[in-house]
Amino acid sequence: DAGITQSPRYKITETGRQVTLMCHQTWSHSYMFWYRQDLGHGLRLIYYSAAADITDKGEVPDGYVVSRSKTENFPLTLESATRSQTSVYFCASSDRTSGVAKNIQYFGAGTRLSVL
Amino acid sequence: KQEVTQIPAALSVPEGENLVLNCSFTDSAIYNLQWFRQDPGKGLTSLLLIQSSQREQTSGRLNASLDKSSGRSTLYIAASQPGDSATYLCAVRLALSGGYNKLIFGAGTRLAVHP
């Protein structure tokens, strides 16, 4: 399927476990992003990537790890999940080309993660 | 630090009403401002993007305005329909070095349009 897909859509895990959220895009967009959405906070940037093998921290990176070995994939790993990481996670991608188009971020449907 | 506030947090209106959603931001040094729609259980869909040099953008029944100097944007929805029920998010984009533009989101306005 064309577009940006996230998996799983729902995940329940326990405190201390490692969990990986997957993100895959078919457009060959250069930029990819991970956000978390919590009630009353809007979306906050966790990590972003400008290209394969280039990643950088966003506003709330603590407790998360990312990698980008291929342009189309940008997995997010919670190395030791905590209850405060219960949230909805969104992945997005954006093209590098100049003009208005490069400013548009396309979002996946989200992963709802519950840490018990 | 840039902060984005959306008022009201929730809104319920009868079908057919014209309505205004408000977004304010604390730092006027923005690259552009974007309005998104979010449906339950789904991702975000971009509705309108206003460049910092523009005053407004229109798409169908939607009109977004931007007053950068006062740190405000409004999203006007004409003749609302039940299908407009969703959460509307405002985000400002900050221009950073290295080509990456950072989005700062408001918490959203949850809109319910009832028949």
Image (spheres, coloured by chain):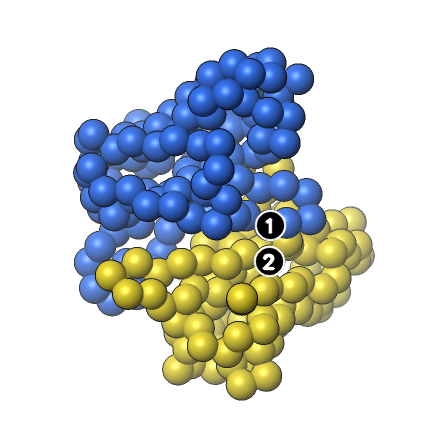
Chain colours: A blue, B yellow
For residue B106, the mark is: 2
Q: Residue at x 48, y 37 (%)?
A: A62
Callout 2 amino acid? Gly
SS at mark 1 in the image = strand
Please indicate, yes or no, whether residue B8 appears anywhere in the rendered image.
Answer: yes
Quarter of the image for residue A39 reads top right
Residue drawn at the location 39% of the way across and 82% of the way down: B53
Q: Secondary structure at mark 2?
A: loop
- Where does the image place residue A76, in percent across and percent down from the top left? 40, 29
Vertical arrangement, residue A66 with respect to residue A29, above or below: above
Closest to the observer, A96 or B88 = A96
Measured Cα–Cα span from mark 1 to mark 2 = 5 Å
Q: Does residue A59 appear to the left or right of A52 in the view shown?
A: right
Is residue B62 something that shows in the picture? Answer: no
Check contact, mark 1 vs mark 2: CB within 8 A: yes
Q: Work out whether B27 lies above or below B83.
A: below
Residue kind at label 1, given as amino acid type: Gly
Task: Classify 10 Å Cα crowding around label 1: few (below 14), some (14-19), many (20 and above).
Answer: many
User: Residue under circle 1?
Assistant: A42
What subunit carries mark 2? Answer: B
Q: Chain of mark 1?
A: A
